[in-house]
Image: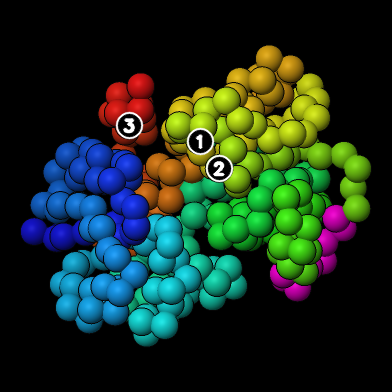
Amino acid sequence: MKQFAVIGNPIAHSLSPILHQEVYRQLDLDASFKKIHLMPNALHSFMNVNELNGFNVTIPYKQSVIPFLDELDESAQTIGAVNCVHDGKGYNTDWIGFTMAMEQNGISLNGKDCIILGSGGAARAIAFGLVKFGAKSISIKNRTQSKADQLLNWINSIFPNNNASENSDVIVNCTPLGMWPDIKSMPDLEIKKGQILADTIYNPLETKWLKTGGERGAKTIGGLDMFIGQGLASADIWFGEKISEKIKLEPIKKVLKSELC
């Protein structure tokens, strides 16, 4: 049996085992997936002794895991964060999850003026996805201006960015605003009819920000599709084949939603 896991601190809230076990069920794969709660001082020993066939990495280890890896793929190297490990190599599938979610919802990013809310690791991965899929411009809004500037400088280093646009076709929330249990908070940003609002949060399934956006005529995409996308992209790497093209999405969404509702 192949064994996989997700490591993090905290980790109790993770739905990754439910996602991956549904994939294994659909494809009749002999594999298991578990959560591993790692304290910071245990990362080194875990990296030396684990015999997993692959694992996901979540907060706070997406950067601190890098020194223990033999190599990084292009996206992980550029983004500077790893969320998937296989055979000593680090990958970033967060950006793939985002772009998969856009495609599934019929959204083309090509030529779009985009705003990212937040400046952490998720924001960097989203920015990489926007660049890869042809965004026209990317601007950053963040509580700490210096961190927004830092992220913008990084974007400008990989992308000839015209970030002065006053308009925005796509807004992506990479902050925890609206995440359970603080479900009444939301980004303070004008929402216009016809805009595309994407949230990286999947608990709750529809944040207050997305609900408000929908009421104002925006197209909204919740974080569940991105979460599923990054997990399927990880499975593609671990199994060395396009697992993501073989599974049915609706049963996965159904089982995950039952955990969230």
Query: Relative to 250, is 212 on the left or the right?
Result: right
Does residue 162 appear to the left or right of 252 in the view shown? Answer: right
Q: Is residue 36 visible?
A: yes
For badge 2, the amino acid type reads Pro
- In front of the other: 144 or 197: 144
Q: State which tag comes first along the sequence, 2 or 3.
A: 2
| Foreground residue among 167 and 73 | 167
Q: Position of residue 8 (x, y in %)?
A: 34, 59
| Colour pattern | rainbow
Question: Taking 91 as reference, is 10 left or right?
Answer: left
Give the total of numbered labels: 3
In this rendered view, identify the residue nearer to me: 137 or 11.
Answer: 11
Q: Quadrant of the N terminus?
A: bottom left
Circle nearer the viewer, 2 or 3: 2
The picture quadrant where one finds residue 82 is bottom left
The verdict on residue 159 being magenta is yes
| Mark with earlier residue (1, 3) | 1
Give the Cα distance between marks 1 and 3. Answer: 16 Å
Mark 1 lies on residue? 179
Specify the quadrant of the image occupied by residue 54. bottom left
Residue 58 percent coordinates (x, y): 40, 58
Q: Amino acid at mark 1?
A: Met
**Contact between labelled residues 1 and 2, with CB atoms less than 8 Å apart:** yes
Q: For the residues carrying marks 1 and 3, which lies nearer the camera in this image?
A: 1
C-alpha gap between disc 2 and disc 3 = 20 Å
Distance Cα–Cα, label 2 vs label 1 = 5 Å
Q: Is residue 142 left or right of residue 71?
A: right
- Identify residue type, mark 3: Leu
* Dot 3: element: helix
Q: Is residue 192 above or below residue 179?
A: above
* Residue where numbered disc 2 is placed: 176
